[in-house]
Amino acid sequence: MGELKFPAHVLREYALIADGERGAIIGPKGDIGWMCVPRWDSDAAFTSMMGGPGYYSVFPRDPWFVWGGYYEEGSLIWHSRWVTSGGIAECREALAFPSSPGKATILRRIIPVDEDTDFEVVLDVCAGFGRHSMTEVEKHKGTWTARSGPLRVRWTGAERASLDSGGALLMHIRVPKGGFHDLVLEISSGPMDEPTPADELWRQTETAWASEVPEFEDNIAPRDSRHAYAVLRGLTSAGGGMVAAATFGLPERAEAGRNYDYRYAWIRDQCFVGQAVAVTGAHSLLDDAVRFVSERVLEDGPGLKPAYRVDGTSVPDEHTLTRLPGYPGGKPKIGNWVNKQFQLDALGEALLLFGAAGAHDRLDLECWRAVEAGIDAIEARWREPDAGIWEIDDEHWAHSRLMCSAGIRAVATLAPAPQASKWSALADGIAADAASDCVHPSGRWQRSPTDDRVDAALLLPGIRGAYPPSDPRHRATYDAIAEELGRDGYVYRFRHDARPLEDAEGAFLLCGFFMALAAHQLGMGVEARAWFERNRAACGPPGLFTEEFDVLERQLRGNFPQAFVHALLLECSSRLSQSRADDPA
């Protein structure tokens, strides 16, 4: 039933609800087609997005409807909205917030807007990526309980539901205009306490979101900034670890083999978020990032891994999950091969994060130990080849070395004079080494000693202070990227081969925001706003971004939603606002 009734949609049509410990992806038919329980990297209990069983859907019975939706500002409380032949209807949806570590609570409030409306509700929990159907399905005093493999299920508000021949719970309900109907679904890895009334869960969730997300009144895109922050908060666990995305196996390009598992915390991504938040003020996500990254640096030092589970443990080896067909054009892969890589630039990003936190006086003694451990790790390994920001072949990447230089400079400004002098000398030496073999004859930076191509990532060292913005290599690199990698206001990472850029991959939204930051830094306000506005529009109706954007088809590509894109949107909107009064009208 699930494969036929709730097929995959294009990514731009999905919304996310999340509580920090897990997230649910909702399609236009009110279908939750993806959710891992009890935590981000657990097996999924809803998999229809990947062609498997397991779904939870609420939608109008009228077959003629047009879908839309919106978030309540400054939250991940989503409203699915349908215009039908009989009127307008909504379903208010959220994961109960603050979260419980071992239990997901999905809140759904059905709301007819202008007419009495008939709804269809379908629930089929299939734990273990669809391996386990619902068993022990029982109703007691109007509340359904069930088991699905290791998970316990409790569903309130569905006393009219019945078990269909396929083992799913199905309910038809008519809700009168002016009224509403609450559904509360709890999925837990252990025993559950007595249920909390839906009204109280909604009140707690509204209050928690209101306290978590700042106003951002003084930047050029306050609504988008609040939304980006809410997304980042929803992806960040209580332990401080933030997943790169809520999904796995969504292809960057159909049938190209580039589909990965992003349900883990990348050090670089977490640092991007912390640095973005630091620009806006010392908010809780900055402290979360510092706590998580400093713990990893102290534990692993020179062996710092690119990514971890959100609890700080190792990412599993990559393998294909054969029991699911996968999202169209991709393969469902679990784990990630970066667990075998060394990425030197992550150490530089960690120091940049610590420097940003230190500027807000947010570093304690333990964090200063992490600063010193990070510098020791760079000193031990900066001459080694690494996989770099794009996680490819080991090379002496210019970007990796220059980011280490930038990171060391950032913390040197906070250190006592003798230590600052020593660290600055190290930063100078690393930058000089990169300059000795990675400056192109044209005067711009090139990727590595053996690769003379330009790369959009080479903007970041200049943005982060590896050298002054006035350095001619910075402007030359900006100009080369605009000419060689810019298309229609978007930016590609690098040229793979002789094919047109769009035939190799999608535009990288991260790189488009790099261009906005660089143009702003170089005093080109109009160009900065143009890059920013173009790239912040590359989302679906829910305002969520993926890693790549297909410029030709105007579609989202890759895992969803991609945290670091939201982070750079937040940083850009804050930094560009600083010169708003000076920009031409």
Image: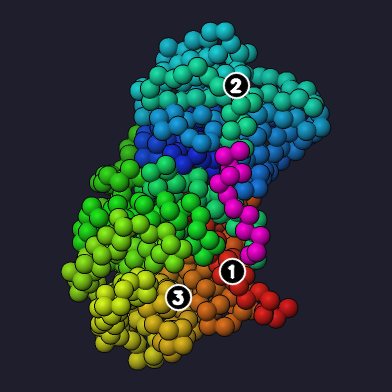
Amino acid marked by disc 2 = Pro
Mark 1 vs mark 2: in front: 2
Q: What whole-number distance in Å separates the C-alpha atoms at marks 1 and 2?
A: 44 Å
Is residue 444 covered in magenta? no
Q: Residue furthest top?
A: 141
Q: Report the disc number at residue 463.
A: 3
Residue 50 versus residue 584: which sits nearer the camera?
584
Snapshot colouring = rainbow
Amino acid marked by disc 3 = Ile
Q: What residue is pinned by disc 2? A: 197
Q: What whole-number distance in Å separates the C-alpha atoms at marks 3 and 2?
A: 50 Å
Q: What whole-number distance in Å separates the C-alpha atoms at marks 3 and 1?
A: 15 Å
Decide if residue 391 is on the left or right side of residue 280.
left
Precedes in sequence: disc 3 or disc 1: 3
Visible in this render: residue 302?
Answer: yes
Residue 50 versus residue 514: which sits nearer the camera?
514
Give the residue displayed 46% in from the left and 79% down from the top: 481
Q: Position of residue 516 (x, y in %)?
A: 54, 73
Looking at the rendering, the stretch of residues picked out in magenta corresponds to 207-219
Mark 3 vs mark 1: in front: 3
Give the residue displayed 72% in from the left and 25% down from the top: 180
Q: What residue is pinned by disc 1? A: 532
Amino acid marked by disc 1 = Phe
